[in-house]
Image (tube, rainbow, N blue to C red):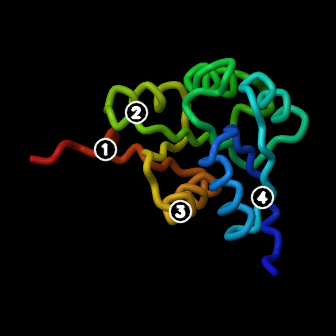
Amino acid sequence: MLEPSGHTMLVLDQDTIGDLLKFVLERRCGDRVIKGGSGGYALELCQEDPPDAIWTYYFLGDMNAWDFARQLRTTPGIEHIPLLVWSANPALGWLASLYEAGVTAHLLEPFQPVELLLARDALLAGQQYGFERLLSPPEE
């Protein structure tokens, strides 16, 4: 049996990707996973019991990822929590807007389970993930 990692992850999605995240994070990493619903409810959960990271789809039901990131980053006590957003949008403008709003990491759908592990490690280390195309200098 896998030893608990001691990390708590808040996953905001009621779809199959949220189920995949929950499975990988619990079974492969030993994380405790809390599944949340709307963005407003997630912010309340974070204030009550701050997770080590938040994973969310770009639309949270009552708000989008930008609004959620902005609220998270301006709420004392939880503003430091790493935030990962996944989406199927590869546009650089989209990535830039997430980055500017305070999103820590981005996963582009479709993604492989190994990418979840890499993103998790980056989040827990306080590093960004998935913004390489945005932050790296253009190729000549």
Evaluate if marks 4 and 3 touch, with contact meaning CB atoms under 8 Å apart. no
Amino acid on which the number 3 mark rests in the picture: Pro
Q: For residue 95, which numbered disc appears in the image? A: 2
- For the residue pair 24 and 120, the one nearer the viewer reads as 24
Q: Earlier in the sequence, mark 4 or mark 3?
A: 4
Evaluate if marks 3 and 2 touch, with contact meaning CB atoms under 8 Å apart. no
Q: Is residue 115 left or right of residue 51?
A: left
The secondary element bearing badge 1 is classed as helix
How far is the residue under mark 3 from the one under mark 2? Answer: 21 Å
Amino acid on which the number 2 mark rests in the picture: Leu
Evaluate if marks 1 and 2 touch, with contact meaning CB atoms under 8 Å apart. yes
Q: Position of residue 114 (x, y in %)?
A: 51, 65
Q: Identify the residue under disc 3.
A: 113
How far is the residue under mark 1 from the one under mark 4? Answer: 29 Å
Crowd band around label 3 with a 10 angstrom C-alpha radius: few (<14), some (14–19), many (20+): some
Crowd band around label 2 with a 10 angstrom C-alpha radius: few (<14), some (14–19), many (20+): many
Which residue reaches farthest front? 16
How far is the residue under mark 1 from the one under mark 2? Answer: 9 Å
Image quarter (top left, top right, bottom left or bottom right) of the N terminus: bottom right
The number of callouts visible is 4
Q: Is residue 21 above or below residue 117?
A: above
Q: Earlier in the sequence, mark 3 or mark 2?
A: 2
How far is the residue under mark 2 from the one under mark 4? Answer: 27 Å
Q: Position of residue 98 (x, y in %)?
A: 48, 29
Amino acid on which the number 1 mark rests in the picture: Arg
- For the residue pair 64 and 98, the one nearer the viewer reads as 64
How far is the residue under mark 1 from the one under mark 3? Answer: 21 Å
* Residue at 60%, 48% in the rendered image: 17
Which residue reaches farthest bottom? 1
Q: Position of residue 90 (x, y in %)?
A: 34, 37
